[in-house]
Amino acid sequence: MSAAPGLEALLARVAAGDRTALAALYRALEKPLYRFVQGKLNDPAQSADLVHDVFLEVWRNAPRFEGRSAAKTWVFGIAYRKVIDVFRAQARVRLTDEIPEAEDDAPAALDCMAAGQAQERLRHCLDRLKPEHRAAINLAFYEDMGYREIAEVTAVPEGTVKTRIFHAKKLLQHCLGQFGISEGQG
Amino acid sequence: MNGLTREDVAGRLPFAVNGSLAPEEAREVEDWLARDPDLQDDAGFLTRLRALMRAEPLPQTGTEFALARLMRDLPPQQAPAGPVAPARWQGWQAPAFAAGIAALVAGLGTAALMRPPAPAEAPIYEQAPVYEQASGDAAELPRLTVTFAPEARLAEVSALLQAQDLLIVDGPGALGLYRLELPPGADAAAVAAALARAPIVASVEAPE
């Protein structure tokens, strides 16, 4: 499984009021959390503030952590709920799969090709996913979470997680295929 | 787990690739892969996709300064539920800024973003700390006062502080002074010596 060793122990120390443990937890998770949040919000300032708020909540609520999930899953779940709160406040997306994925139009793809880097091509393709699909594949491949963990973070059934990643894979296969990456040249 | 269908296996492929499946599930997926070329192709793509995603560098976030801000803002634990004061954006955390910053201390604009300006007549090491530990024992931990070389980069400072498990609890002041809190049980003299050897550290003042 993907849980980094020691996070649960750190969280237990945080629950006891240990700021050093909070700092260690922060150093372990801040960048992955920021990447996850920024992948959904696409707003560096707001993402940084949200991660800050996540750790404030971790500090406040660590005594309530019961260990029924991995510490990392618990923290990412807090982040996900805060992102959803932002979306709700901004009415940017409905909390269903109703928003269509962007068409992979040729001009955008060509612009991306001009940039010339596989990472930029990947970013181009990831950005074209629905937020829910992007979140699922990000948690699966950036964080190596299992489907049960992702289901817990995103508060959806396990089957929904698999469906979201399946759709994300299909679109990414098509999008990256335009650059020859899906066939193994990436 | 027993008798996964092909659809079941297709749904689990990403998790076979990232290694998160339970052993029994993983074995069933492997069995399917051994006899299904289409699933092999899908697994191959997912493996390449994961490798490509994980090759992306983590974002630059100015971790130590964001952490200092967090420590400053820590509320008491288990406080009654209530709205958290919205945190204000501080420009030093922007990746673009972090990437572009040429010198940490020379850019004293950071100081204005970290905390209100210190009174000119009060040296930073004589002022109250930026935050107090919610659990009440922050003042017991030893602290060092340091300045960094003008050419020190944010990433270098972060790496040094993390290597020594140090926290920024105050600064930078007008003179570029930072106060760093040591972890419990740390040998302050040894840490101060280690910092003094770092090329990016201009000065270290051990606790009295």
Image (spheres, rainbow, N blue to C red):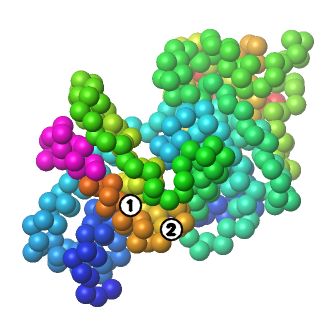
> Which region is colored magenta?
A171-186
With A173 as the anchor, is B65 left or right in this view?
A: right
Q: Residue A178 colored magenta?
A: yes
- Which chain does the residue under circle 1 lie in? A
Q: Position of residue B73 (x, y in %)?
A: 77, 41
Find out whether the residues at labels 1 and 2 contact each other: C-beta distance under 8 Å. Answer: yes
What residue did someone put label 2 on?
A: A156
Q: Amino acid at mark 2?
A: Val
Residue under the point 58% across and 39% down: A47
Q: Residue furthest right?
A: B121
- Is residue A115 at all visible to an observer of this figure? yes
The crowding category of the residue bearing disc 1, from other C-alpha atoms within 10 Å (few below 14, some 14 to 19, many at least 20), is many
SS assignment for the magenta stretch, majority = helix
Q: Nearer the viewer, residue B136 or A52?
A: A52
- Residue B26, labelled with which disc? none
- Which chain does the residue under circle 2 lie in? A
Q: Position of residue B58 (x, y in %)?
A: 44, 39
Residue under the point 40% across and 72% down: A159
Q: Position of residue A151 (x, y in %)?
A: 48, 67
With B100 as the anchor, is A128 left or right in this view?
A: left
Compared to A84, does B169 lie above or below? Answer: above
Residue under the point 20% across and 54% down: B45
Q: Residue B90 colored magenta?
A: no
Q: Residue furthest bottom?
A: B2
Mark 1: secondary structure:
helix
Quarter of the image that includes the N terminus of chain B: bottom left
- Residue A164, labelled with which disc? 1
- Is residue B190 at all visible to an observer of this figure? no
Q: Nearer the viewer, residue B164 or B2?
A: B2
